[in-house]
Amino acid sequence: MNPEIQGRVFAPTDPYLVGREKVREFARAVFATNPLNYDVDAARAAGHADVVAPPTFPIVIQERTLAQLLAEPDAGIDFTRVVHGDQRFTYTRPIVAGDELTATLTIASVKSLGGHSMVTAVSEMVDATGAHVVTATSTLVVRGDE
Amino acid sequence: MPQFSQLPNIADLTVGDIVATAEYHLTRDSLVRYAGASGDFNPIHYRDDFAIAVGLPGVLAHGMLTMGLAVQCAVDWAGDPSSVVDYQVRFTRPVLVDAVTGADVTVSAKVGALDTEANVARIDLTVTYDEQTVLGKAQIRVSLASVAA
C-alpha cells in the first residue's frame, strides 16, 4: 500500500442521524441488557435526551469513513487482505438517539512491519453544532503478498 | 418509575476486584444479526465456503461483535452505558463460530486502576473463547461522576 497517504484528511461524511430503533437494534446485536439502551423513559430519568447508544455503536458511522479509505484510488489497499488490529473509542459525551453525527477521517500513520502495513485511521465525530462527541481509532493490518 | 442511575462509588473499589463476569453463547444467528445491525457484511462472518476459500478455519465472529458484547457486563455494573468514556481492545485471536454448536465466550471485568481525582476507574476485561484469550489490552475507562447535569 501507499505510505504517502499518512497525514491525509478526508472529506467529512454526510450527516448520520442516529435513530432510536437503530440504537435498539444495535444494542440487541451486542447482547446489551441495560434499560438505558432501550427505554426512553429510563434514559430520560437518568438525565439523557433519549436512548443511549452502546459504547461500540460509533463503528456504524466509522465504517463510512473506512469505506472512503478503501475506495481511495491511490491508497492501494486490497480490502480482502485487511485484518482489524486494534480499536478504540474515546468519548466527550455519549451518543443518544436524535444525534446527527458527521465523521472526518485522518490517516494518522502508515507503518511497514515485516512485509505487512499497519494503518492507523482516526475518525472524529462531531454533532450538528460541530461539538466533538467521540473519536474512533482503528489500526488496520494490511497483509503483504504471500 | 425509573430512577437516576446509581453509579458505583470509587471509594468502595480496590484494584484487582472482579466487578462483573458474563458468558455469551454465540450462534450463526448472532453473527447475522450483528452484520445487519452494524452494516458489516463481510461473508467470512456467515459463509463457510467463503471463509475457507480465504484460508480461515471457518466462519468467525466479527471482532467488533466480541468487543461490543464484552463491555456489556461492565456497563451493567456501572448502571449507565454513558459512563464508558473510553474503550479499547486489541484483536488477538478469532472466535470460530460452529454452525451447529456455536461458540461460548466468557468475560471477566476487573478493576485495573483507580483515578480518584478524576473519579474514573479503569476496568480491564479478560475475554476468553476455547480457553484462550481473544482480546488483548481490553480496557474501559468508566467515569463514576454523575452523568446528569
Image (cartoon, coloured by chain):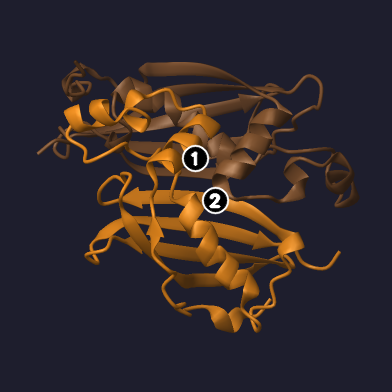
Q: In the image, A62: left or right of B39? A: left
The picture places residue A122, in percent across and down from the top left corner, at 45, 64
Helix, strand or loop at label 2? It is strand
The picture places residue B97, in percent across and down from the top left corner, at 74, 30
Residue A79 placement: quadrant? bottom right
* Name of the residue lying farthest toward the left: B149
Rendered-image quadrant of the N terminus of chain B: top left
Q: In the image, A5: left or right of A125? A: right
Could you say which chain is coloured orange in the image? A
Query: Tag 1: residue type?
Result: Lys
Q: In the image, B95: left or right of A124? A: right
**Residue at the spot 74% in from the left edge and 68% down from the top edge:** A115
Q: Are marks 1 and 2 in contact (CB under 8 Å)?
A: yes
**Residue at the spot 20% in from the left edge and 16% down from the top edge:** B12
Chain of the residue that carries numbered disc 1 in the rendered image? B
Check disc 1: other Cα within 10 Å, few if <14, some if 14-19, many if 20+. Answer: some
Query: Tag 2: residue type?
Result: Asp
User: Nearest the camera: B38 or B1?
Assistant: B1
- Residue B119 shows in this picture: yes
Residue picked out by circle 1: B137
Helix, strand or loop at label 1? It is strand
Check disc 2: other Cα within 10 Å, few if <14, some if 14-19, many if 20+. Answer: many
What colour denotes chain B? brown
User: Nearest the camera: B140 or A114?
Assistant: B140
As drawn, B8 above or below A3: above
**Residue at the spot 69% in from the left edge and 72% down from the top edge:** A77
Residue picked out by circle 2: A86
Marks 1 and 2 belong to one chain: no
